[in-house]
Structure formats: structure tokens, C-alpha cells
Amino acid sequence: QAFTDTVGEGVDVIGVAVFGDLIEAMGTTYCEEEHRRTIKKISGADGKITRGAFIAWYLDWLFGGDESDIETDEEDEADEGEAPAALSGEGWGSAFGVEEGSWKCDACMVRNKAADTKCAACETVR
């Protein structure tokens, strides 16, 4: 509904300049730095974003299915000629890194250790 409210009835393609308005219409804060990667990922070569591509990305973003964003962020930073903070030894580094083999609970989205057979928060069986 926010897509239609922002760009109009029957419009299925938006320019990247409208992306921020669309995000804010959905009640989310738009951050040019953070969403730059998203725009690059979901826009076509013509600089347009289709309704389908936006909805697929938004649902994936809301429900945490897009684990590849972590890798994409590091690749983008490397493309810009800057070393990621984790590699440069500056900043928080890997303080919020994901432990290898860990799993995310489907019920409450809490990240659990690989050896856990049930969620530490809600006790849902893995």
C-alpha cells in the first residue's frame, strides 16, 4: 500500500530518488549511507526499482532472510578503497560477528550457539 501511496496507482517502477520517500512512508528511517547498498542491489541498470524487487527485498529485510548483507557490506567497503574496520584493527571489529555454525530461532529470531538443541530465549526446538 505504501508503494501505491508514494508513487501512485498503477506505477510499478520508481527511480532511485524516490526510494527514501518510500522507505519513510513505510514507517522506517531512511539512511542514505545504509540504503545506498540496497539501492545498488535492487535497482536495474537503468537506475529504476520495480515494485516486485522492492517488495521482495523489504520482506527479506523485515524477516531476516537476507544473511548475505554482511558479506555485501564488506565487499562494498573494499570496493571503495577502504579497509573494513574488522581488518584494519580499528573500531568494534568483529564484536558483533556471527559465530560460525550458530542458528537463528524461527520463532523469536534469537541467535543461538551451534551446540544448542533448543532456543535459549523461547525454548523452541531447533
Image: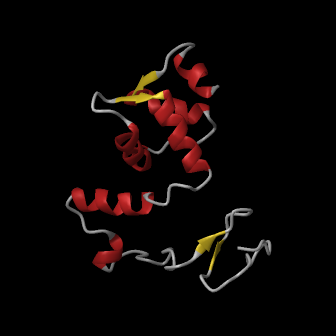
Residue appearing at x 71%, y 81% in the figure: 117
Left or right: where 30 falls relative to 103: left
Q: Position of residue 45 (x, y in %)?
A: 27, 32
Q: Nearer the viewer, residue 32 or 48?
A: 48
Farthest residue toward the left?
81
Which residue is most to the bottom?
Answer: 115
**Residue drawn 43% across and 77% down?**
94
Say whether residue 29 is visible.
Answer: no
Image quarter (top left, top right, bottom left or bottom right) of the N terminus: top right
x and y, in percent, of residue 101 in the image: 53, 79
Seen at 62% across and 35% down, the residue is 26
| Residue 58 horizontal/vertical position (percent) | 55, 42
User: Residue 115's image quarter?
Assistant: bottom right
Q: Is residue 33 above or below residue 78?
A: above
Say if 106 sits above or below 38 in the image: below
Residue at 33% x, 33% y is 44
Q: Is residue 63 above or below residue 92?
A: above
Quadrant of the rendering where the C terminus is positioned: bottom right
